[in-house]
Amino acid sequence: MFLKSKKRGFTVIELLVVIAILGLLASVVLVHLKGAKVSARDAERKGEVDSIRKALAFYYTEHSKYPVSGEWISLEKDAEDGGLVSQALSEWLPDMPEDPLYPNTKESTGEPFSYQYSTGETGGYGYKIRTEMESVAYSYHEVSSVGGGSIVYGDGEEFTCGTDTVTDEDGNVYNIVLLGTQCWFAENLKYDGDPSGNGCKDVTWVNNSDEGWCGDYTGGPFTDEGLLYQWSTAMNGAVTEGAQGLCPTGWHIPTTDEWIDLERYACEHKIDANTFDECAITFPKDDIIGWKGQDTTTANGEGSYLAGNEGLWINHDIDNHGAGDNDFGASGFLALPAGCRYASGSYNSRSARTYLWSSTQSDTNAWVGELSHDYTYVGRYKYSKAYAFAIRCLKD
């Protein structure tokens, strides 16, 4: 004889506990899904900003500037109103992106979760795109061009490359110039870390007899070419490529690749200009030293395009083989023949050559951009860090 087991049902309390647990689990799942959706929307926003950035790059290639907004605008609202920026980019971006959470709801530039764009009031030297992120309250994703990074959202003060000046901590004031997407000093650095002008900033890092020297060229005919710096002083003791060095805050010692970008720009924009593809071939980003570009009989080479102050160079030119047809000063970069100081302490090449440090090392040497009075093209060489050359700062 078998006994039947007696099944016990759930009590009311047990049912309530189960329901509570299921509710808690559901809440956890919902929170997780909500977080995943927020992250996905933020990722989409970043992707849309990148799409706008790419369209701006294509526009710049054709027009040598960016679409000028004159103020911060909402690109979605601009598109709805048939604005100039959205029209300018329509060839590469037919449909201006809309925010994934709040499409078509932007009534002012102050609304969150929209793609804000500005070039400032005075021209398309650079841009900044800004959009709010959901994942962290009051956090933002910003993308800017070289030269556009100093645009401030809201009522902040703007920096315009080509019209503003830069002042270092010693009080020296420098003109600047926009070349392509790069914002350069149009003068050699004069900063020595001592407002009285009686010494150089103390640098203790030593490499290859480089003791951190800087100073004036001794016994020359002119004094507006800035100072000469051993590499460790130029870098202010840093060894990282692209370091600020002695440049003012927001500026840095250019890398050798950034020098090559400048060479390519000169190749494209000098009087007898070439195409971008031709210039990329002429000025490859490799580690081969030598003179590159054009050594022409009309002096329309990259070297003369980047040079400045014709009267300071030997024979008053970068060799044009007697043609008398220079394009000195055409770029606004205005490189001067400041010469150099050797590790021994002797000086050479003033009025004949300019040597400009990069922040890119090569063992005990570092890469240098070079111009010479007897060539119309541009040199790229590696020299001992113990030599002292001039500095041109580049905007971050």
Image (tube, rainbow, N blue to C red):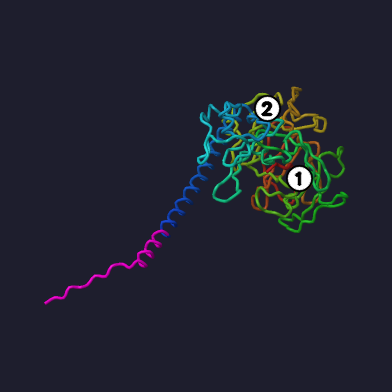
Cα–Cα span, label 2 and label 1: 26 Å
Q: Nearer the viewer, residue 124 or 253?
A: 124
In the rendered structure, the answer to whether residue 251 lies left or right of residue 79 reads right
Residue furthest to the bottom in view is 1
Residue drawn at x 47%, y 50% as measured from the top left: 34
Q: Answer with the quarter of the image where residue 374 lies.
A: top right
Furthest residue to the front? 12
**Residue appearing at x 50%, y 44% in the figure:** 41
- Other residues around mark 2 within 10 Å, as few (<14) / some (14–19) / many (≥20): some
Name the kind of residue labelled 2 in the image: Lys
Tell me if 63 is positioned left or right of 99 in this view: right
The magenta region covers 1-23
Residue that badge 2 annotates:
270
Left or right: 110 with respect to 91?
right
Q: Quadrant where the N terminus lies? A: bottom left
Residue 238 at x, y = what percent? 70, 54
Please name whichever residue, 5 or 312, is drawn nearer the observer in this view of the structure: 5
Assess disc 1: are there few (<14), some (14-19) or many (≥20) residues with their C-alpha within 10 Å of its C-alpha: many
Report the quarter where the C terminus lies.
Answer: top right
The local secondary structure at tag 2 comes to loop
Name the residue that disc number 1 marks. 389
Number of marks drawn: 2
Position of 116 with respect to 384 (left or right) is left
